Image: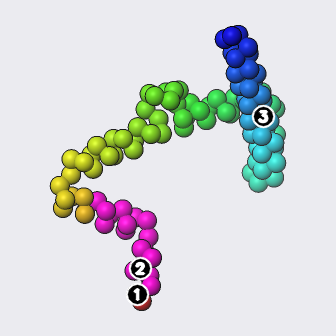
């Protein structure tokens, strides 16, 4: 039972890597030579770019090892330990960083 499931997963992974590599290659060859005068790349080089970008920007942590959702959990824990005054100061700082509130822009 696990054999067919593994084969489906492996086939899906291979297709996904192929599609992403092809998209990276096409985008690079479409944009970079005309804009910057750089050379076109091959499919293998596009796969290398995908691996390099994963190393530089995504890491190899896996899902449970500290990726996208862990920062939300850490922020929630920090927020829980704040005093009401610290929470209000935090909220004001967040609103300043995100632009004006809709009710502020309407009161002009």
Q: Do the residues labelled 3 and 2 touch (CB within 8 Å)?
A: no
- Look at the picture and state if 45 lies above or below 84: above
Q: Residue 99, image x and y in percent?
A: 44, 70
Q: Callout 3 environment at 10 Å: few (<14), some (14 to 19), or many (20+)?
A: few
> Measuring 18% from the left and 61% from the top, which residue is drawn there?
85
Q: In this view, does 80 lie above or below 101?
A: above
Q: Residue at x 44, y 82 (%)?
A: 105
Q: Where is residue 106 in the image (x, y as percent from the top left)?
A: 44, 85
Q: In this view, does 65 lie above or below 40?
A: above
3 or 2: mark nearer the eye: 2
Camera-side residue of 4 and 79: 4
In the picture of the structure, the residue carrying the numbered disc 1 is: 107
For residue 97, the mark is none
Q: Farthest residue toward the front? A: 1
Q: Can residue 59 be seen in this view?
A: yes
Q: Is the magenta stretch mostly helix, strand or loop?
A: helix
> In the rendered image, which residue does mark 2 sit on?
103
Marks 2/1: CA distance? 6 Å
Q: Nearer the viewer, residue 47 or 83?
A: 83
Determine whether, in the image, residue 102 is placed left or right of residue 16.
Answer: left
**Magenta segment:** 89-106
Relative to 45, 76 lies left or right: left
Residue 4 picture quarter: top right
Q: Mark 3 points at which residue?
A: 19
């Amino acid at each position: 039972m696990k054999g067919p499931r593994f084969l489906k997963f492996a086939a899906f992974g291979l297709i996904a890597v192929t599609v992403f590599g092809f998209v990276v290659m096409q985008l690079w060859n479409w944009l970079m030579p005309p804009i910057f005068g750089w050379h076109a790349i091959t499919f293998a080089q596009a796969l290398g770019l995908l691996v390099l970008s994963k190393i530089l920007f995504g890491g190899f942590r896996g899902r449970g090892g500290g990726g996208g959702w862990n920062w939300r959990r850490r922020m929630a824990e920090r927020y829980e330990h704040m005093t009401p005054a610290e929470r209000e100061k935090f909220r004001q700082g967040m609103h300043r960083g995100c632009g004006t509130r809709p009710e502020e822009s309407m009161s002009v």
